[in-house]
Image (spheres, rainbow, N blue to C red):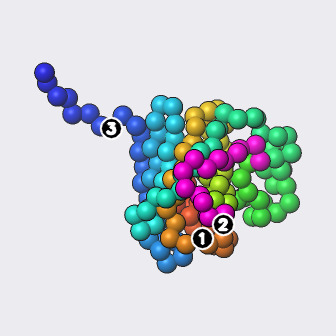
């Protein structure tokens, strides 16, 4: 039997950078039935969240807000789509971490659906943040790293 060397069948991307002074690594793996995104600081992954991208279609108000620019587009650019629902599947026992994890997961889901409105796979997000930081700069820097992998 001959072994044929082929690339890994799932499309994979990685990015790394500093977020609030902490080295952060992001990886995305596009499987046939799921999309996996990990956001890790210090090599940890302690909180796992999933977001069904095939849930209800976006509501008309969210679509109008994003298409028309809504209020101030800078204020609404980082708002996740309202029809996406994140559910913690592992970890997330600390309420602050759970809330931040679900916010990141819905934001990642929103970015994926914005890029490809026909996307229907299940999104699984693994988080390993050293500390809970809800500052806008930290959130924006982390999302920027994730966008490099989508």
Camera-side mark, 1 or 3 = 1
**Boundaries of the magenta span:** 82-97
In this rendered view, identify the residue nearer to me: 4 or 97.
97
Q: Earlier in the sequence, mark 3 or mark 2?
A: 3
Asked if marks 1 and 2 touch (Cβ < 8 Å), the reply is yes
- 3 vs 2, front mark: 2
- Pointer 3 residue: 8
**How far across and how far down the image is residue 30, in percent?**
47, 39
The nearer-to-camera label among 1 and 2 is: 2
Answer whether residue 148 is visible to the viewer in this image.
no
Label 1 to label 2, Cα distance in Å?
A: 7 Å
Residue at horizontal 54 percent and vertical 51 percent from the top: 90
In the rendered image, residue 93 lying in the magenta stretch gets the answer yes
Which label sits on residue 15?
A: none
| Residue 59: percent from left, percent from top | 82, 40
Give the mark nearest the N terminus, 1 or 2.
2
Tell me where residue 3 sits by quadrant. top left
Which element carries disc 1, helix, strand or loop? loop
Say if 122 sits above or below 68 in the image. above
What secondary structure is marked by label 2?
Answer: helix
Direction from residue 30 to residue 97 in the image, left or right:
right
Pointer 1 residue: 132
* Residue position for label 2: 96
> Residues under labels 3 and 2: Cα distance?
36 Å
Viewed as shown, does residue 41 lie left or right of 108?
Answer: left
């Amino acid at each position: 039997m001959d072994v044929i060397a082929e690339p890994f069948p799932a499309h994979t991307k990685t990015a790394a950078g500093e977020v609030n002074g902490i080295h952060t690594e992001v990886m995305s793996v596009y499987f046939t039935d799921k999309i996996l995104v990990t956001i890790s600081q210090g090599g940890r992954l302690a909180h796992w969240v999933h977001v069904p991208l095939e849930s209800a279609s976006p509501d008309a108000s969210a679509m109008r807000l994003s298409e028309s620019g809504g209020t101030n587009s800078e204020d609404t650019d980082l708002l996740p789509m309202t029809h996406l629902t994140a559910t913690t599947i592992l970890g997330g026992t600390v309420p602050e971490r759970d809330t931040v994890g679900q916010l990141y997961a819905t934001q990642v889901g929103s970015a994926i659906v914005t890029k490809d409105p026909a996307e229907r796979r299940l999104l699984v997000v693994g988080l390993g943040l050293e500390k809970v930081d809800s500052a806008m700069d930290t959130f924006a820097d982390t999302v920027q790293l994730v966008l490099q992998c989508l």
